Amino acid sequence: MKMLASFALALIVCCGLLHILRPLATRIGLVDEPDARKTHQGSVPLIGGVAMFCGFTLATLTLDVGLTAYRGFFAAAAIVVVVGLLDDIHELSSRGRFGAQIGAALIMAYWGGVVLHDLGHLGGEGRLVTLSGWAIVFTVFATVGVINALNMSDGLDGLAGGLSLIALLGLAYVADSAGRDAERALLLMLAVVVTGFLAFNLRLPWRRRALVFMGDAGSMFLGFALTWFFIALSQGDGRAMPPVAALWLLMVPLFDTVWLILWRFSQGRSPTSSDVGHLHHVLQMTGMRASTSVWVMLCIASVCAVAGVAALEAGVAESTMFYLFLGLFALYCVFMAVSWHRRRLLWWPIERRLLGLPDRREHAQRPVEERRRVADRRGGA
């Protein structure tokens, strides 16, 4: 009963702040303005991250779990939220953002003791892939990777929050099955505040636009939190899951991000440049509405997460799960590449007008750089 009261407090604080801070955010300029790349309507407050962090932090103080071991978590989370908030207001350089993410990962490793020491039995049963002296490097890489995968997926109302919620619930189930009560309580608390945020962020039949965005503060906070629990639950003798399970719980944003990086590199562009290569962009280019695209991607993510958890329950070998993951990623890359080449997603044509492109024959005569500029103006990162 006390835990339910804590969850209720988290929800009330989060939703209350989302309501109270909206006019304040508008006054101080903490809003996302529409432009050539961002097609939302009007100025939208970027307060989701602050509300989720405050609701989660205050409510965890009422839980009957030992929070001493999580001091490093809250310190690092506070850093990424503050830096994310500054980025939402002033648009920090990529160096500043990456610096904060690396700093949070180092706090997690050295203060929190949460380090990626091994990758599990990827070489087969009894063949543990240990990282030894590379453990800290891989921990930082994983943290920065997950944070930015979630950040890059934050392109449609409800998408990043929904993907986070699916991963959090999957982790909470794993923690509960392993008897990890503290982690289960904290993960469910995170799921509660994300649900509160989604109530303001999702497009609904009676509301055609989001009231708030999570901003970089939100995506960095949730990305860091997911990484912490991914590693904490997958390391040590009493691990609740193998590291490969994390790939299945966050499969959709990981696939989308790695595909985009490879695609942009193949075109000689920076991996942080803007385009319309995201899966949600491709879905919309078939004529699918934004809200429908979100639900399609969330359904795919749910199937992947359930499949990963089911594989754990069934005792599927870690190496098998890993190679299946790689195989699915290869299929995803082929699928996306063919879709772009044929301008068709399965049996749905990708409408050239939604890309801002003219007739195919005229388009073929335009310089590559000009076509790229048109796509950049129409798309998002």
Image: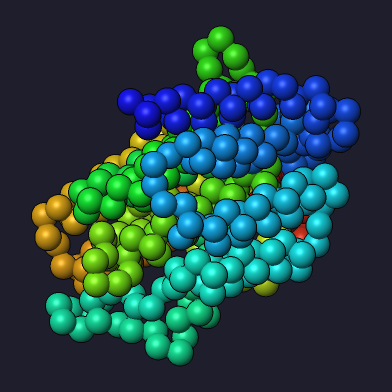
On the picture, is 210 further left or further right than 310?
right
Name the residue rendered at 56%, 10% in the picture: 206
Above or below, 113 relative to 5:
below
Kindly indicate the quadrant of the structure image that contains residue 99. bottom right
Counting from the top left corner in percent of width and height, residue 200 is at 59, 24
Name the residue rendered at 22%, 53% in the picture: 178
On the picture, is 26 further left or further right than 333?
right
Q: Nearer the viewer, residue 193 or 359?
A: 193
Above or below, 277 relative to 126:
above
Q: Nearer the viewer, residue 352 or 376?
A: 376
Counting from the top left corner in percent of width and height, residue 54 is at 62, 38
Counting from the top left corner in percent of width and height, residue 23 is at 80, 22
Can you say which quadrant of the picture contains the N terminus? top left
Q: Nearer the viewer, residue 373 or 51?
A: 51
Residue 319 can be seen, yes or no: yes
The residue lying furthest to the top in this view is 206
Please give the count of numbered marks on the rendered protein: 0
On the picture, is 230 further left or further right than 153?
left
Counting from the top left corner in percent of width and height, residue 96 is at 77, 65
The residue lying furthest to the bottom in this view is 133
Kindly indicate the quadrant of the structure image that contains residue 214. top right
- Which colouring convention does the figure follow? rainbow
Residue 375 can be seen, yes or no: no
Name the residue rendered at 34%, 45% in the picture: 184
Kindly indicate the quadrant of the structure image that contains residue 157. top right
The residue lying furthest to the left in this view is 314
Name the residue rendered at 61%, 64% in the picture: 104
